[in-house]
Amino acid sequence: NAGVTQTPKFQVLKTGQSMTLQCAQDMNHNSMYWYRQDPGMGLRLIYYSASEGTTDKGEVPNGYNVSRLNKREFSLRLESAAPSQTSVYFCASSTGSLNTEAFFGQGTRLTVV
Amino acid sequence: RKEVEQDPGPFNVPEGATVAFNCTYSNSASQSFFWYRQDCRKEPKLLMSVYSSGNEDGRFTAQLNRASQYISLLIRDSKLSDSATYLCVVASGYALNFGKGTSLLVTP
């Protein structure tokens, strides 16, 4: 059972480089999310997609763009990476209904030097 | 003010102890409430949902007080394997808002 799959698991970027974090879920979920987790800050929502074709900003969207490519896939793009974007990034998905849990991918550890 | 507030701990307790975590949230229109568990360098996983009437799952009991905008998690008979970070999660619309987490260390 794959669940939520994120790629890559680890990445080192130089300041100014761009990259796309990929996320796919095989649970037929409507809603997908991107979070970042930093020490002492907890999980902060970057962007979410309530359903295919829609995306909305979360708490910390600056410096990021997203694409809900289809129902399965939700990608996160860093156009010009900055050291402040060094973090662990988690993708999650849920049915979008009340009281249903979100399932998380294993995370991407990104370092920007 | 962050939407979901938790005491970060750490809570260091001996095996067999009872420990309680608290969480407050700011959005009175919040609709769904959860406790997640996160082990070191792993993804968060659902521990339990929190219902208005309170609910129990084995050694774990969750309570919700909508009037006070307060959620709690009680762990009885702590095990070494309960050592983890416990995340309070509040859903407002489609967004899931996480607290910073409370760290628990259960010692022999």
Image: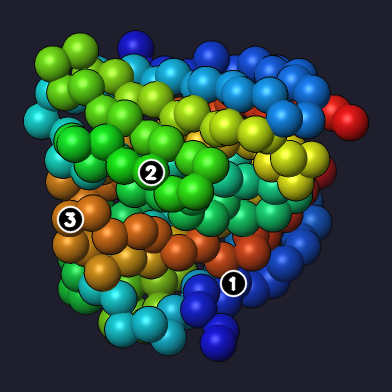
- Which label number is shown at residue A98? 3
| Residue drawn at 57 percent across, 76 percent down | A5
- Observer-side mark, 3 or 2, equals 2
In this orientation, does residue A44 appear? no
Nearer the observer, B106 or A25? B106
Amino acid carrying label 1: it is Gln
User: Which residue does the numbered mark 2 point to in the structure image?
Assistant: B56
Q: Specify whether disc 3 shares its chain with disc 2.
A: no
- Which label number is shown at residue B8? none
User: Which residue does the numbered mark 1 point to in the structure image?
Assistant: A6
Q: In the image, residue B100 lies at what x, y percent?
A: 53, 27
In this orientation, does residue B103 appear? yes
Q: Residues within 10 Å of mark 2 (few under 14, many from 20)?
A: some
| Residue drawn at 79 percent across, 23 percent down | B14
Q: Is residue A58 above or below residue A84?
A: below
Nearer the observer, B73 or A68? B73
Horizontally, residue B28 falls left or right of residue B76, namely left
Quarter occupied by the C terminus of chain B: top right
